[in-house]
Image (cartoon, grey):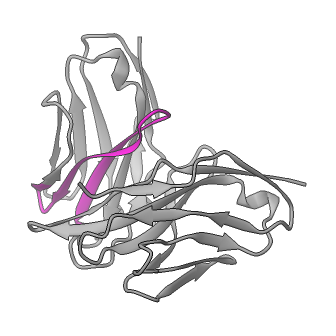
Amino acid sequence: GDSVTQMEGPVTLSEEAFLTINCTYTATGYPSLFWYVQYPGEGLQLLLKATKADDKGSNKGFEATYRKETTSFHLEKGSVQVSDSAVYFCAPAYSGAGSYQLTFGKGTKLSVIP
Amino acid sequence: KAGVTQTPRYLIKTRGQQVTLSCSPISGHRSVSWYQQTPGQGLQFLFEYFSETQRNKGNFPGRFSGRQFSNSRSEMNVSTLELGDSALYLCASSLAWGYGTGELFFGEGSRLTVL
């Protein structure tokens, strides 16, 4: 079935370090791709999205590019802050048979230390 | 604009009992989805409702059920609780599912502990 593979965590970085969280998905059709973030004690919120190949989603200094040829949507940030400490979820959205469903990765916990 | 509201936020039940969780979506949103989040399995899709109709269902036993009311509010019910049902249950709403936006707005969740 449709699935997504996300880099295992936890990831611990020092402030201002470069962040990459890898995400690959199964290439069933052309899913829209999303990154969601969950801060401690909160629900998930959309971080960024890309709906077609070569699109780049960006928000709050985070970026991810829809790579159809490698079926990837890696999340990057050039300089992380302590406030970026959270769990990050990659989520392709597959459609078919009249439905449209997000499939979430396992999540990658990021801890940023001062 | 109020966000997605889930009640109760925390609850403790014992095995064999049943539980009902409630979700009020963002005003104007007609689609409500439910997810179960556990440390071992991550986020798993339970079901989605749109205009009072279940449009999609995940791979969960029949003990898990849900419904949506005409005002788009939704409830999910778990009967004959098992220890493994302990989880954070997340509700998410969206304007109109299936039209390509894909953006879900999540509530803070209802944390269920089964003893």
Task: Judge by depth and name the residue closer to the eye, A80 or B80.
Answer: A80
Q: How many numbered circles are shown?
A: 0
Q: Does B102 appear above or below A38?
A: below
Question: Magenta segment: does it hold B72?
Answer: no
**Viewer-proximal residue among A94 and A84:** A94
Across and down, in percent, residue A62 comes to 65, 75
Height in image: B59 above or below B53? above
Residue in the foreground of this view, choosing between B46 and A63: A63
**Direction right: furthest residue:** A114
User: In this view of the protein, can residue A71 be seen by the observer?
Assistant: yes
Residue B39 falls inside the magenta stretch = yes
Q: Is residue B103 left or right of residue B56?
A: right
Quarter that holds the N terminus of chain A:
bottom left
Q: Residue at x 81, y 58 (%)?
A: A82
Dominant secondary structure, magenta: strand
The residue segment tinted magenta is B30-55
Q: Is residue B14 above or below residue B19?
A: above
Q: What residue is shown at x 86% (from left), y 68% (from top)?
A: A16
What is the quadrant of the C terminus of chain A in the image? bottom right
Residue at 33% x, 64% y: name it: A26
Residue B102 position, x and y percent, is 33, 72
Dividing the picture into quadrants, the one containing residue B12 is top left
Residue A101: which quarter of the image?
Answer: bottom left
Q: Residue furthest bottom?
A: A54
Residue at the location (41% across, 50% down)?
A: B5
Q: Is residue A76 left or right of residue A89?
A: right
The residue sitting at the front extreme is A69
Residue B2 seen anywhere in this rendered image of the structure: no
Task: Give percent across and percent down for residue A17.
Answer: 83, 66
